[in-house]
Amino acid sequence: LLLGTDERPDEYGPSRTDTMILLSVNPETGAMGMVSLPRDLWVPIPGLGITTKINTAYQLGELQDYPGGGAQLAKDTVSSFVGRPVDHFVRVNFDGFRQLIDLIGGVTIDVPYTIHDEEYPTQDYGVETFHLDAGLQLLDGETALKYARTRHGDDDYNRARRQQDIIRAVAQKVMSAGMIPQLLGKAPQLLMTMQNSIETDLPVPVGIELAKNLQEGGTGEMGRLVLDNRYGEETFSSEGAWILLPDRSKVRVALESFYAPLVAPRGAQAIAMADPAAVRIEVLNGTSQPGAAARTAELLKEQGWQVTSIGDADRNDYAQTIVINYGVADNLIKQVSTDLSLTPEQSQLRGLAAATPVDIRIVIGNDILPVIR
C-alpha cells in the first residue's frame, strides 16, 4: 500500500494522507497492477466502528492508538474494502517524492493535455500558477510532484491517473538495465532520503528479492484501475462532507477483472484445477473466536475436503468469510462455499500467487460462526 502524505497539518494531524494506491506484484512473472483509492471514498474503518473517508485511516490509527499504528489501520481498512490481504506499506512524504525523482534523473511523461492551474497550493498556504504543456516531457522532482497533485481544471480521478503515470514511469526507469549501476553509485543519497522521508514495513531482503525478480521478468504493461465515480455515487455524508459512496457490486466486478491477468503464470494462462482430491485448502481464523479455524477445518474434512493447514488471519474482525481462489475451477469454489453455508457470489475472490502451497485460502469471518458451533 503506497501512502503519499501532505507536509501541511490539518484537523487530523500533521501528516494528511493525500494519495492511496494499492500496488500488486506477481514476483514470478513481474506482472504489476495499481488500484487508486480516491481520498473521498466512504468506507468502514475496522476496529473503530465508524465509516468515514478512506484517507483518514492513517491519522485515525495514530490518534486512536490502533495496534500497529496508522499504517496498520490504513492496511486493514484497504484490505477490508478490497477483500485481499495488504502485506506491506510504503509511506512517502512530498519532500521524499521530489528527492527520489531527482535522484533517478527525472521521469519522462506523455502529458495528454495542457495543464494550467492558477491555484496550485504552496507550503505557506498560498497559491501559485502551475503550467505544463501537453506532449512528451522530462519532469524533475518538483514538476512531477505538481503534475501528480494538481486538480484544478479536472478532478481527483484524473489526478489519480496522473499519479499512476508517475509511478509507472518510475518503475520502468528504475528497472531498466542501465539504471541499477547509477542507483548503486547514489546509494548514500538514497539511504538518506529513505531515512528522512520514507517509512515502510517491507523487509530489506524481501525488497531486494522482489527488485531482482522484477528486473528479470520485466515490468511490462502495468494494470491500472481508478475507483472513480463509475463505481459509486458522489454525494454528501450526514455531516455534509463530499464523499464517494461505493457501489459494492460494481467495485467487486472491477477488482475481479483487474486482478485476473495478474495471476497468469509466465508464458501461459492459468489452468483451473478441477480435481477435488488434489485441492489444498488453508483455513485462517479472521475472528476473535478461539478454535474457529480448527472447527471449520473439521467440517470441511467431514465433507471430503483436504485441509493442509490452519492458522490466524492478519486480523480478527472479518465480518464476512472470504474464499480466495488460487487456480481452482469455479464449480469447486461454489461447492466449498455451499458446504460452509456461504453465498458463493459474495465470498469468492481470485488471488495472486499464494505465498504458501495452497489452492484455496479461506479466511473465516463472523458470519460462519453459527455454522461451526
Image: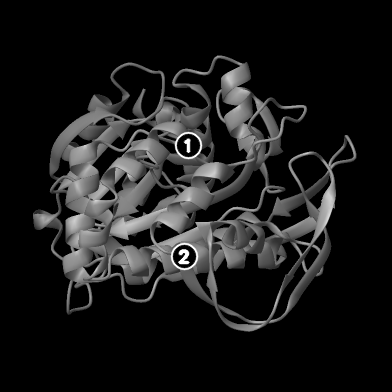
Residue positioned 37% across, 36% down in the render: 192
Label 1 sits on a secondary structure element that is helix
Residue positioned 23% across, 28% down in the render: 311
Extreme residue toward the left, this view = 278
Residue 285, relative to residue 197: is it above or below? above
Residue 349, relative to residue 293: is it above or below? below
Going by the image, does 45 lie left or right of 255?
Answer: right
Going by the image, does 217 lie left or right of 41?
Answer: left
Q: How is the image coloured?
A: one colour
Extreme residue toward the bottom, this view = 135
Residue 88, relative to residue 357: is it above or below? above
Q: Nearer the viewer, residue 312 or 369?
A: 312
Amino acid type of the residue tagged 2 in the rendering: Gly
Rendered-image quadrant of the C terminus? top left
Label 1 packing within 10 angstroms: few (<14), some (14-19), many (20+): some
Q: Position of residue 161 (x, y in %)?
A: 60, 67
Residue positioned 74% across, 52% down in the render: 244
Q: Position of residue 202 (x, y in %)?
A: 31, 38
Q: Nearer the viewer, residue 160 or 368?
A: 160
From where the camera sits, is residue 265 visible?
A: no
The first of marks 1 and 2 along the sequence is 2
Residue bearing mark 2: 106
Amino acid type of the residue tagged 1 in the rendering: Ser
Label 2 packing within 10 angstroms: few (<14), some (14-19), many (20+): many
Q: Nearer the viewer, mark 1 or mark 2?
A: 2
Label 2 sits on a secondary structure element that is loop
Residue bearing mark 1: 197
Going by the image, does 343 lie left or right of 358?
Answer: right
From where the camera sits, is residue 78 visible?
A: yes
